[in-house]
Image (cartoon, grey):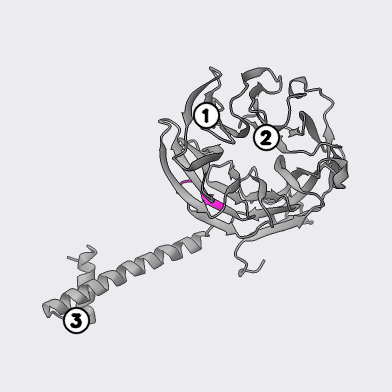
């Protein structure tokens, strides 16, 4: 790929508005070459992604379905749909992929369905034969998430009902009707002991799952509304990230998950944030806004690592980092899916930055010494100035 191309991305249009997207847990290694068939050792391979969406009832003329596609890390290519599963009159709204198996939970209008990736022959998506009775007739779920170790599943409903189940037994751990007017987003803490939830209005709540009760409520400053939420993932800094809307602006706030005090906030979008994600390794955050823009951020300081203006034509509906944290998948109501490969400065580029900083430091000392020598009527020869610079830097006495 040309070095002039700033970011490595791929985009493809499908034939339906997309509401949800997820990476499957498996990455199939790609052979290094045909002669020896050795697998590449840089983590490159082919990953599987699942999209869901549709037009609602049949009168719209747009079918409701789930799509299965491939993403090739080496070529940065997203495939056409390789398998399609109809969901009849129920558009799929949200997906949660189990981190250690081929199971996928999908939210539709009235309940949730359990799906399986079947790779016996060609890879395909199937409705599981297992009946998941506790997920039947629970209404539309706005959010679904598995805990990091896959032992729990949390659901947040349009009716404000919050549920946490043991997996795979589906025994209830917590059942909170009216947790919010409508649940907007949920996320497990790294160790799975806490669950954070936000609603369409009102405070964010943090739940202790061992007690099945709220431990704190977090409120936005006056004039702001809380949005989407993610716990930190790196295990070293106890952070909770919450998006906020201040007027029409998109903001990310960082809260200490020990004291539950907000430590900082930063405006990162001129438009409301509609999608939010954190990488599995905890290094990156990503936001998508109502105008279809996508940004990748440094989770430590909220600095912008990458940005793609107009990645989609309309608002971003869902986004998720790949299991290896090397790529970001985003989808939109404009029927587009896009993968943004995470591009960071190479070691060589890093050394160039340090060298430039060193040269700027030397120049600042140079001008300081020249001015000082000129005011004192001292020696302005190159040798004298260099000598004084070295003295100020502590290299020479």
Q: Residue at the location (40% across, 62% down)?
A: 354
Horizontal side of 239 relative to 53 (left or right) equals left
Horizontal side of 159 relative to 33 (left or right) equals left
Res. 195 image quadrant = top right
Q: Earlier in the sequence, mark 1 or mark 3?
A: 1
Residue 150: image location, x then y, percent? 65, 29
Residue 119: image location, x then y, percent? 82, 38
Q: Secondary structure at mark 1?
A: strand
Q: CA distance from mark 1 to mark 2?
A: 16 Å
Q: Which residue is mark 3?
A: 380
Q: Is residue 309 shown to the viewer in this render?
A: yes
Q: Residues within 10 Å of mark 3 (few under 14, many from 20)?
A: some
Residue 11: image location, x then y, percent? 72, 57
Label 1 close to label 2 by CB (< 8 Å): no
Q: Which residue is mark 2?
A: 142
Q: Which residues are magenta?
A: 296-300
Q: Which mark is residue 205?
A: 1
Q: CA distance from mark 1 to mark 3?
A: 66 Å
Q: CA distance from mark 2 to mark 3?
A: 71 Å
Q: Is residue 361 magenta?
A: no
Residue 99: image location, x then y, percent? 67, 34
Does 339 appear above or below 63?
below
Q: Residues within 10 Å of mark 1 (few under 14, many from 20)?
A: many
């Amino acid at each position: 790929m040309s070095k002039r191309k700033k970011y490595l991305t791929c985009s493809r249009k499908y034939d339906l508005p997309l509401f949800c997207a997820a990476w499957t847990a498996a990455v199939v290694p790609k052979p290094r070459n045909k002669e020896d068939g050795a697998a590449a050792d840089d983590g490159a391979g082919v990953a599987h992604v699942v999209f869901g969406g549709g037009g609602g009832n049949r009168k719209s003329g747009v079918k409701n379905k789930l799509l299965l596609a491939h993403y090739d890390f080496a070529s940065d290519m997203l495939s056409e749909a390789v398998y399609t599963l109809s969901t009849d009159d129920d558009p799929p709204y949200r997906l949660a992929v189990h981190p250690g198996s081929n199971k996928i939970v999908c939210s539709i209008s009235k309940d949730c369905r359990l799906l399986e990736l079947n790779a016996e022959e060609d890879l395909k998506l199937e409705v599981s034969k297992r009946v998941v009775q506790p997920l039947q007739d629970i209404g539309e779920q706005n959010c679904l998430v598995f805990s990091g170790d896959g032992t729990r599943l949390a659901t947040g409903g349009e009716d404000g009902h919050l549920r946490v189940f043991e997996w795979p037994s589906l025994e209830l751990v917590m059942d909170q009707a009216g947790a919010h007017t409508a649940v907007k987003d949920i996320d497990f803490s790294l160790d799975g002991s806490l669950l954070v939830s936000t609603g369409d209005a009102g405070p964010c709540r943090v739940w202790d799952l061992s007690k099945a009760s709220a431990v704190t409520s977090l409120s936005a400053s006056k004039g702001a509304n809380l949005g989407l939420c993610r716990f930190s993932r790196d295990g070293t800094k106890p952070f909770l990230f919450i998006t906020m809307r201040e007027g029409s602006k998109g903001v990310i706030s960082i809260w200490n998950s020990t004291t539950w005090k907000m430590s900082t906030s930063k405006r990162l979008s001129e438009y409301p944030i509609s999608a939010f994600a954190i990488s599995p390794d905890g290094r990156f955050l990503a936001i998508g806004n109502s105008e279809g823009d996508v940004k990748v951020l440094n989770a430590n300081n909220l600095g912008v690592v990458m940005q793609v203006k107009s990645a989609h034509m309309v608002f971003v509906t869902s986004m998720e980092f790949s299991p290896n944290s090397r790529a970001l998948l985003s989808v939109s109501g404009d029927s587009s899916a896009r993968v943004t490969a995470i591009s960071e400065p190479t070691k060589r580029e890093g050394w160039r930055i340090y060298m430039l900083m060193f040269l700027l430091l030397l120049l600042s000392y140079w001008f300081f010494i020249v001015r000082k020598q000129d005011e004192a009527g001292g020696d302005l020869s190159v040798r004298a100035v260099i000598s004084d610079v070295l003295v100020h830097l502590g290299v020479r006495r």
